[in-house]
Image (spheres, rainbow, N blue to C red):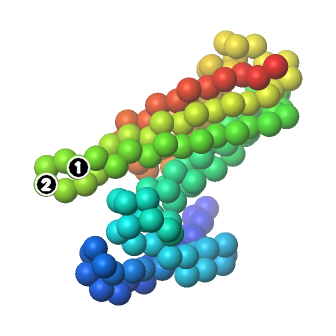
Amino acid sequence: MSIKKKASAHWEGDLKTGIGSISTETGVLREAPYGFKARFEGGKGTNPEELIGAAHAGCFSMAFSMILGEAGLKADSIDTQAEVTLDQVDGGFAITAVHLILKAKIPGASQQQFDELSKKAKEGCPVSKVLNAKISLDATLLS
């Protein structure tokens, strides 16, 4: 089975003063503005790193839910934050790391199970697999 999802970007102008928009097939993002200021200077709009972070946090949370289910567990809540690091390297830029921060409430889960299953989700999440960056995880089991 092969699933294909589409997103698009439009750009006008040069790097620093130009402006672009990003759209997704589902319409969740519809001509969302992005540009240099949003990416490097904290300006309004979105940026690729923020979108990768959202995709990674969402993918990880779903993968973790699946892995919990396979272990006979069900989460009351899974909250994941992804911190994406963009570094200047060799005269250019690269996403060098993603740090996932997980807080989950899982009735009946031991700390050992939680640690093992969250690590498995980090390694098995499709977005983790596509990123060529160091991916770390801080996981907290809430009671």
Q: Is residue 18 left or right of residue 110?
A: left
Q: Nearer the viewer, residue 90 or 126?
A: 90
Quick check: 77 above or below 15? above
Report if residue 43 is visible in the image: yes
Q: Quadrant of residue 17?
A: bottom left
For image coordinates 67% across by 72% down, the residue present is 28
Q: Which mark is residue 88?
A: 1
Element at label 1: strand
Q: Nearer the viewer, residue 115 or 90?
A: 90
Distance between the alpha carbons at the discs numbered 2 and 1: 7 Å
Q: Quadrant of residue 74?
A: top right
Residues under numbered marks 2 and 1 in contact, where contact means CB atoms less than 8 Å apart: yes
Q: Residues within 10 Å of mark 2 (few under 14, many from 20)?
A: few
For image coordinates 39% across by 72% down, the residue present is 35
Quick check: 139 above or below 61? above
- The residue wearing badge 2 is 91
Give the quadrant of the N terminus. bottom right
Place of residue 38 in the rendered image (x, y in percent of width and height, measured from the top left) = 43, 65
Q: Nearer the viewer, residue 48 or 24?
A: 48
For image coordinates 66% across by 23% down, the residue present is 140
Q: Which mark is residue 55?
A: none
Q: Is residue 11 left or right of residue 28?
A: left
Q: Residues within 10 Å of mark 1 (few under 14, many from 20)?
A: few
Amino acid on which the number 1 mark rests in the picture: Gln
Amino acid on which the number 2 mark rests in the picture: Gly
For image coordinates 19% across by 56% down, the residue present is 92
Report if residue 126 is visible in the image: no
Q: Is residue 131 left or right of residue 24?
A: left
Q: Residue placed farthest to the bottom in the image?
A: 12
